[in-house]
Structure formats: structure tokens, C-alpha cells
Image (tube, rainbow, N blue to C red):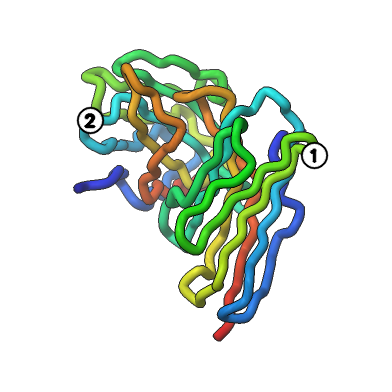
Amino acid sequence: GAGVSQTPSNKVTEKGKYVELRCDPISGHTALYWYRQSLGQGPEFLIYFQGTGAADDSGLPNDRFFAVRPEGSVSTLKIQRTERGDSAVYLCASSLGGQGPSYEQYFGPGTRLTVT
Amino acid sequence: DQQVKQNSPSLSVQEGRISILNCDYTNSMFDYFLWYKKYPAEGPTFLISISSIKDKNEDGRFTVFLNKSAKHLSLHIVPSQPGDSAVYFCAASWGAGTALIFGKGTTLSVSS
């Protein structure tokens, strides 16, 4: 079956611009996560959705970052007034949730964001 | 302050030999541990996991050992194959459905 997909695969933007990154989770997975990976680091948690609601957004670095999942499937990570320090690979993951939440998370290929 | 640490940035092993990747953690509330493998330009791929109530889990060539008293886990790959060359991340969780906390990764190189 299809895995987690993310678009675009690469995004180059100028400092101060707004960007949107999209994630399509595995069909049937109710939990969705966003992580950010900088060079030489492991993925760092940003936000977690269970269904349509953000169950934990404690990893969002500041109020320039926002994510939505309006219908409980596709999610969009939105970054306003981008800064060079936002440059990283943004990873999306999904897992079984609902009645049987799972520890195992399955990742997409990521979106490489470069802010010039 | 890193809660999950992989202190060896890299490891080189010959094909057919054992690869041992190590991971230490500081938070005793973690109740589940996972290993992911990552190839360049791809997302991390789930490899194997272990619950804190166990001390060993095996899946084919991959075995994970957990030593709770030492807050240490290790991944053994036997026999190692060139296709195993990748970055390996250790991750920990304190509840199903919660965020994973990752180490910085260890780059494994298996030579033929």
C-alpha cells in the first residue's frame, strides 16, 4: 500500500516569505506527526495530531509555525516570515491511533526547505 | 539537554561480521524504544522496537537489547550486509501515540 507522501520534495524560498508543506498519511492512520531534522541531528518533534485536533504542539518553535489537519487526513505545515534558521528537512509521520494507538511511526521522505 | 544519546557518530564493519550500535537515555519515564534506519534523501524507516518490560527482541538479523538499570540499549545486526549501510537512529517514547525523542544517529558502513 501507499506510504506517507510529502510535497514538495524540495522548496527554496526567500527570507521573509510564507511556505506551506503538505503531508498525506497512510490510509487509516489517525495519528499524524511533524518533525524537523537539521544537518547532523536526529528528527525533532514539532506537533502531533490525533484526528483533526492538535493533541500536542509543544515542539513548535514559535508562533510563526502553524499546522492544520481539517479533515483528519492530509495535513499542512505553515511557516510565516521564514528565517534562514528554518532551513531543514521537514518530516511527516503517521501511525495507528484511535482505539489502539501505536508506538511505531511511519515516515514520509521529507521536504527539504532552504531559506535564502 | 539530550535525553537520547548515540555517542558513536560512525561505525565501520566488514560484511558478515556483527554490527553493534549503542544508545543511552536519561529519562526513566520512557517505556518504549525504537530503531530506525535512514538512507540519504529518504525518510527514516522503522526497523525494530522493544517495550520497557522486555530485555530482548529479535527479528531476523536484527536484535535489540535493553538494560533498564543502565538506561542503555543496543542494536545487533548479524550478519552485516553492505545494504545495511545507512544512518541508524535510536528513538524513545513515553506513551503510545506520543512524540518520539531521537538520538543524533550513527552512520554504519558495511564493506564487502
Q: Residue at x 53, y 65 (%)?
A: B86
Q: Residue at x 57, y 64 (%)?
A: B77
Q: Residues within 10 Å of mark 2 (few under 14, many from 20)?
A: few
Image quadrant in which the C terminus of chain B is located: bottom right
The answer for which chain carries disc 1 is: B
Q: Is residue A85 at all visible to an observer of this figure?
A: no
Residue most extreme to the right: B70
Residue B98 vs B54, above or below: the answer is above
Depth order, front residue of A22/A114: A22
Q: Are marks 1 and 2 in contact (CB under 8 Å)?
A: no
From the top left corner, tell me how far across and down residue A95 is, in percent.
36, 32
Image quadrant in which the N terminus of chain B is located: top right
The disc labelled 2 sits on which kind of residue?
Gly
**Residue occupied by mark 2:** A28
Residue A4 vs B76, above or below: the answer is above
Residue most extreme to the bottom: B112
From the top left corner, tell me how far across and down residue B38 is, in percent.
49, 57
Q: Is residue A50 at all visible to an observer of this figure?
A: yes
Q: For this view, does A115 lie left or right of residue A99? A: right
- Looking at the rendered structure, which numbered label has been put on residue B70? 1
Depth order, front residue of A88/A4: A4
The answer for which chain carries disc 2 is: A
Q: Residues within 10 Å of mark 1 (few under 14, many from 20)?
A: few
Q: Could you say whether the residue bearing mark 1 is in a helix, strand or loop?
A: loop
Depth order, front residue of A59/B61: B61
From the top left corner, tell me how far across and down residue B41 is, in percent.
43, 60
Residue B19 vs A96, above or below: the answer is below
From the top left corner, tell me how far across and down residue B16 is, in percent.
57, 79
Q: For this view, does B74 lie left or right of residue A51? A: right
